[in-house]
Image: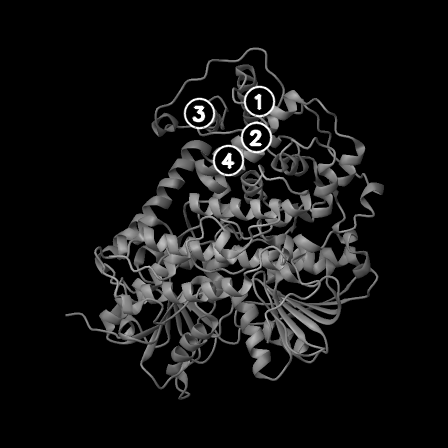
Amino acid sequence: MNSIVRPGWVCRVCAARIPHIFLHQQVGATRTFTATAPGFREKSNSKKITRFADRSCYKGSQSKDGDKFRLLKRLIIHRFQGLIDSENTRFVGASDKIDPAHTKQFINAISESCDLASKNDITTRAENPLFFTLRSAFVEGNVKGLDKEIKYSFSKFLFNTTHDEAITSAQLALANFQHPEEWYPATRALQRTVHLHVGPTNSGKTYHALQALQKAKSGVYAGPLRLLAHEVYSRFQSQGIPVALVTGEEQRFPDADNYLVACTVEMSPLNQILDVAVIDEIQMIADNQRGWAWTSAVLGLMAKELHLCGEERSVDIIKSICAKTGDKLVIHRYERLNTLETMPKSLDGNYRKLEKGDAIVSFSRVGLWALKRSIERKTGKRCAIVYGGLPPETRAQQAALFNDPDNDYDFIAASDAIGMGLNLSIKRVIFESVAKNDGTAFRLLNIPEIKQIGGRAGRYRTAAQQDGSGENKGYVTALEPADLPTVKQGFESNAPTISSAGLQLPSSVVERFAKYFPDEIPLSFILLRLRDICSTSSQYHLCDIKESIEVADLIQEYEMPVSDRLTFLAAPVNTRDQNSRTVVKSMARAITELSGGHLLDIDGLDLDLIEQAPQEVTPKFLGMLEALHRALGLYLWLSYRFPNLFVSQTLAFHAKGLLETRINSLLSTMRFDEGKRQKLRQHMRAQIEKQRQHAKDILGDQAEAEEEQMHHYEVPGSWNEEGHEEPVMQNMEEAEALIKPEQKVDPALVGSGTPGSGSGDRPTTSP
């Protein structure tokens, strides 16, 4: 097998420049947008804004005069003034000194938009865009998300007040996304049969779709995660079926003319005629980050048979799409192959209540290894461990150890990646916690996540049931009593039917739209402008572009074509720490200068960390290793898009493999503070409650409705990454709480050790 670049195998964001041959003909129904649209009009008499010292200013009941968003308005203005006063804040398109008149006008715009929502109940994006975006940012990302949206909104406001340019009909035509099915004329020329396989977990829906695929001469499996693509790839390989593996940062092709393909959804080949295509987890079409990839695959794959696998709630949206595309739709419904029950009691935090075949779910690598150690110490039994960040071979080995009834690997510590279909013989799924960090704040698992993860219980006959005794039934519970009600609610509730599919701003449209603006206008503003004026039908929604905006601003200083900028925006970029930003900027500079793309020339890539043996393992050191791992992944991703520039692909693969082994060996030999695990879970629950109360202080009665709506859908942090490589730690606080200080590193362990081998894996009973 060769890891080489094949023509046409790049992600759709980078290569599929969609020929929008119909857009200039279809202006359609669009809303009028001017420099003085609602929410941006100057108000003649403004009131003096009171400054707030702390959050206590927001406490109290909602106004009795009907101004239900009064506190939200005060919060937005307070955060805006904080950004204005900060020396570190830079507004796109603003001069060094912001005109106070513009600040005053924007505060008036905020007040008007909030008053419009309070007094007239006008809260939609179309009718009250400023309020809609700011409130959504607060609901989804708390004050951090709100700050970002305020910054972007004020940048747009500054441009509008200084550049009074009317939007032309041509711009509106470009922004007309009413009929995305027409973006793929070659696919529309085919008569496809769409098979929709729906049912709960462990119902055989994906199995039946894969049966059709493996009989085909040409075809593709498109899954949400690299680990699932790799699992299908390995399965077909073991059956002697020629198969390729294509993900964002790895491509393996067989020495054969005809072969099947296992890929991530973003890498679906839209330019090839296929016999069969399988798209897994079709309900992800509604995801606000990655849903566009499922929509594009459904609309664009040129397959005679298109098999979609997912949840029942996706039926209506697929029916609606097929009615537009003219494809024949056949729906196959499945029932669980066994029964699934939520247990009436939790384990009361007692690991000794674990039974053979139990899977305990946690959400970070530090948490998983700490969990494994605690279980082995308390029970004297072995505990396997699986998560997306493990090398595929190690992950398969750990799964085999757990599935084998003839050894003492009774338990498995697993990440939420098991919810996407790892083949594990699980009797009970036990949630160590129902809270996780999504990169912004702690949140509760939503209904689809709980059902997806918990539904893996009883998936196959467990080791304890191999003798034929006992019913093949799955059970779900929580480790601690405080989390059990959330688990039960997840299984007792039904997520609402999916009503719209995600869309992305097409690269070809962005490139053409950018030509209407001067060269000095940042791409981030162009993207925001296009987001605001675009129109979609009720069947579709525009996916979130906040991360793209951040990356666009980060690389704005480097001169490059818009097409190259858009390629960079599609890359797996992390901008949360300074070193990661340094790496990103160094790679952007290499693209600009067409040199300096060797791995050793990239600023911020400290490869010496791989062999470094510090006196003690600290959370900071683990964070540095994880940042290096992300940077190597970014380099590999770019090496497939700019192969003549980022030429160290082989070295990057080698370094990434060594680093993964190093991280796993360090985690496998660490000592963790068991006494702090329960306190950490209590802290997460307290943080979530604090956030809820904060939202209630600001939104009042609206808070519960907003939270309920968010709770039903996939949200950031669920499966929003192609690779879903779990973070080493959810945040620094988690690692500091769990890792015992002054852990010396044995140089002999550097670069060695895998789960299931070595002294670090031996269970010990507690004294």
Report how far apart the C-alphas of labels 1 and 2 lie in the structure: 19 Å
Instruction: Tell me if label 3 and label 4 are in contact, CB under 8 Å.
Output: no
Q: Residue furthest bottom?
A: 467
Q: Residue furthest left?
A: 767
Query: Identity of the amino acid at label 4?
Result: Lys
Task: Measuring from the top left, give residue 300's x and y in whole percent.
Answer: 73, 59
In the image shown, does 582 or 427 lie closer to the viewer? 582
Report how far apart the C-alphas of labels 3 and 1 lie in the structure: 14 Å
Other-residue count near label 4 (Cα within 10 Å), few / some / many at <14 / 14–19 / ≥20? some
Of tags 3 and 4, which is closer to the observer? 4
Query: Identity of the amino acid at label 2?
Result: Val
Instruction: Tell me if label 4 and label 2 are in contact, CB under 8 Å.
Output: no
Report how far apart the C-alphas of labels 4 and 1 lie in the structure: 17 Å
Query: Identity of the amino acid at label 1?
Result: Ala
Residue designated by label 2: 92
Quarter placement of the C terminus: bottom left
In the image shown, does 526 or 749 lie closer to the viewer? 749
Q: Is residue 431 above or below residue 276?
A: above
Report how far apart the C-alphas of labels 4 and 2 lie in the structure: 12 Å
Pointer 3 or 4: first along the chain: 3
